[in-house]
Amino acid sequence: MAAEVKTTCPYCGVGCGVIATVDEAGAVTVKGDPEHPSNFGRLCSKGSALAETIDLDGRLLYPEIAGARSGWDEALDLVARRFSDTIAEYGPDSVAFYVSGQLLTEDYYLANKLMKGFIGSANIDTNSRLCMSSSVAGHRRAFGADTVPGTYEDIELADLVVLTGSNLAWCHPVIYQRLAAAKAARPNMRIVVIDPRRTMTCDIADLHLAIRPDGDVALFMGLLAHLATSPAIDQNYIASHTEGFASAFASAAALDINDLLERTGLPAMQIREFFRLFETTSKVVTCYSQGVNQSSSGTDKVNAILNCHLATGRVGRPGMGPFSLTGQPNAMGGREVGGLANMLAAHMAIENPEDRDRVQRFWESPVIAAKPGLKAVDMFRAVADGRIKALWIMATNPVVSMPDADSVESAIAACPFVVVSDILRETDTARHAQVLLPSLGWGEKDGTVTNSERRISRQRPFLDMPGDAKADWWQLAEVGRRMGFAAAFDFDAPAEIFAEHAALSAFENNGSRDFDIGARAGISGDAYEELSPFQWPQAAGTEPGITRFFADGGFYHADGKARFVAVEPPATDRTNADFPFTLNTGRIRDQWHTMTRTGKSARLSAHIAEPFAEIHPRDAIETGISSAGLVEIDSPHGKAIVRALVTDRQARGGIFAPMHWNDQFAAKARIDAVVAPITDPFSGQPASKNVAVAVRPFPASHYGFAVSATKPVTPDAAYWALAKAEGGWRLELAFDRTVEDWTAWCRAVFAIPDEIEPLGYADRQTGDLRLAFFDGETLLAALFLAREPVAVARNWAISQLSAAHGDLRKRFALVAGRPGAGGPDPGATVCSCFSVGVNQIAAAVRGGCHSVEAVGKETSAGTNCGSCRSEIGRIIDRCLAAAAE
């Protein structure tokens, strides 16, 4: 009988419940958990494809030292000895941990405990620094604690939802679907999207404010000045529960209308409409994400938003409040345990001597970090200049995700001792490790995560631990013991760690701190196993329930009052004559971080299979960039080569490029190598949304596309992008030189035996070349070359890897690059959940399906996660417009 296990999705901060089923043959299927209060059964495309990402291909299964397999004792002894020796010779600040929002709370807790309480340094930071640390800093300045006041339910209850710096449809798809459903049920609900790009989220927006990069501070300052003279101002709330309004208002009022228009780049009419909606709507939720946080003014952006909610008293009541949407599955859990370099465990403050004393007494630790440690960008600078001599990187890939990534790679490569704990053996970061430690992945891990609405859920294992892989908490506990701290790291199971974490949250609390899960202190192993999702706080003696903060004040500054923060609008334009474009980096719908998980799924790679850059049509014309051609993006820090996507969704003067691609999947597409290491002065978060770059066409002599039944060897090409495909792999190519023997090239790249001869043709006049290799009826590989981007029916060509080719006509059709009669081409994938292509959707529209719902009924597209519904709507509009011409 198949076994069902309730667990939690390992992707974004929505924290969706998942039911994993393992049948008697070991096959895994997943579905949304209808009882989980975050998603009520919904999953996005990534969550729906989780079962496709849990194979052991490429897994790191055994410890390695200097590239050679070792045992755990040998590896852990070496790690403990090198860290201990480095500390003894150079002091505790000569070592560092760089951890991740992919860790479970129990892993995070032990990493923080070991570094801050026993090594005695605060040099532990996390990739969450790159996505939500400005929200942390803004919350702490305004509220006195890193508190998210509201709940997901508030987004559904609001009459106005403001989405600023958030492509909700692609980055938090399940919340987007909850919002879309709420708007469909209550058509009078209004949605405002504030984003330089017209993203898929804009399709449900009543108003899109295409703001200039980093214009948010000025916009919300203008809103505060407007609210202060309107009936929406809540003088009673301000007087009873806040301080600093006069200063914040004076700063906002000093921004005149002309300056506001210039800094935001918005028409006056749109600004007035936004201000009117905010003023006249009581139930307002403002959601903000990376477009706010990833900025050199990110903390001020957060406080400018919070100022407007505090001024109107719209905090902590149903359907009201500011809402930070976290990027990673356990960024919130990391914040709870002090995983950032400037925090202590249980939301205590490292700069507060009473908090330091309290944590040290609870841990019974020999030392406690006395000052904040190095934030991520500064940490890798310290690695580069030799201040940090031993570095342990866990569950993250900074060579891809950090700004100025080439310098980060050089720093890690030169560091005297680097440990990497990961699930994959080959990543851009792992290749520089002296010690590789095999960790558990999703489906094998056992612990907890916390989502954006403060809801703690279990990740439960349903797979056997592969090879000799071990939990991250176990690795940390073992190193702690071997460094001489055995009693403090005497844990045998994650339940014991969670129980200690819960007990610390309640230790000498008495309501003085927001984070309190004392009701779970001392939790037994059985109770931990059965733990249902719950929101914090849950103090001892209380029952789980929906919780909100600050409706009646009760802030965590010493006087119990919130703080308005006077902010100033920053300079927003970093461009110059040499670097005249503004690069905005971000995520796409079906990939996650650096693709170590999602890159394994052919379904997820089908929608967008290679790195790209969006550029406005007029900018493309002026720079000589052609649609589907290749483009070079460079800055003083690095260069990337990606595909050009010419679209009016992108504002003039701007470029958008995703951050996912790396050296495992593309030739030169690590976009964060281009990003300058400019950070917010309060949060230390990098400014990944406003980067001055130059853009130019890449001079390719030939373009190529290939399919292969086996994974290709890294090709000798100026540009390549590799993606998993049904039945094998797909490969995009470009060359800046002539290859004399393409057959030999194919044999080397696709491992074609010498005895198999190709079927194909070459046209010297056009430069076209086609080669296909068959072993009996099986297609081994096919290569299509042209002087322009190759016009091949790609999804159809990929399907030929799984087709029988006994019929010679089918072989010739493949060489021609298009299906023959009776062989329809589905077109580019739109719906990843059901692998529905654009041509199939267009055919449904021509057949009378003139709504997204009708297309879904006909093709299933858009009926699972719903992330593609906006795209389907646009296809319908194009088809109907074409039919009307």
Image (cartoon, rainbow, N blue to C red):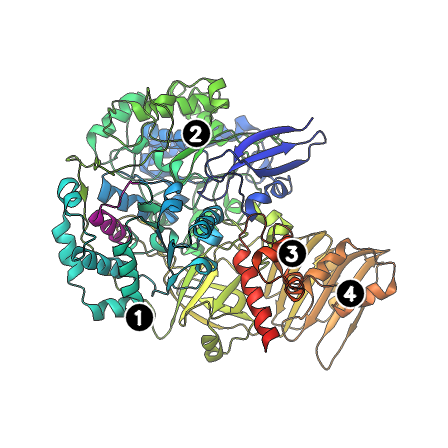
Say which residue label 4 marks: 814
What is the spatial separation of the Cα atoms under label 3 and label 1, in whole angstroms?
39 Å
Among the two numbered marks 2 and 4 on one chain, the one whose residue lies closer to the N terminus: 2
What amino acid type should be assigned to the residue bearing mark 2? Answer: Glu
For disc 2, the marked residue is 106
Instruction: Characterize the magenta stretch by its predominant secondary structure.
Output: helix
Q: Residue 291, percent across and down?
A: 37, 56
Distance of mark 2 from mark 3, alpha carbons?
A: 40 Å
- Residue 306 magenta-drawn? yes
Q: Quadrant of residue 393?
A: top left
Disc with the residue nearer the chain's start (3 vs 1): 1
Is 17 or 84 nearer to us in this picture? 17
C-alpha span from label 1 to label 2: 49 Å
Q: Position of residue 329 (x, y in %)?
A: 45, 40
Q: Amino acid at mark 1?
A: Pro
User: Which element type, helix, strand or loop, lies under badge 4?
Assistant: helix
As measured in the structure, the alpha-carbon distance from the residue carrying label 2 to the one carrying label 4 is 53 Å
Q: Amino acid at mark 3?
A: Val
Q: Quarter-wise, where is residue 466 in the image?
A: top right
The residue to which callout 1 is attached is: 267
Q: Which residue is at the front of the view, 477 or 221?
A: 221
Marks 1 and 4, the one that precedes in the sequence? 1
Q: Nearer the viewer, residue 72 or 266?
A: 266
Q: Is residue 118 magenta?
A: no
The amino acid beneath tag 4 is Leu
Which of the two labelled residues, at mark 4 and mark 3, occupies the earlier sequence position? Answer: 4
Q: Which residues are magenta?
A: 300-317
Foreground: 58 or 861?
861
Mark 3 = which residue?
Answer: 836
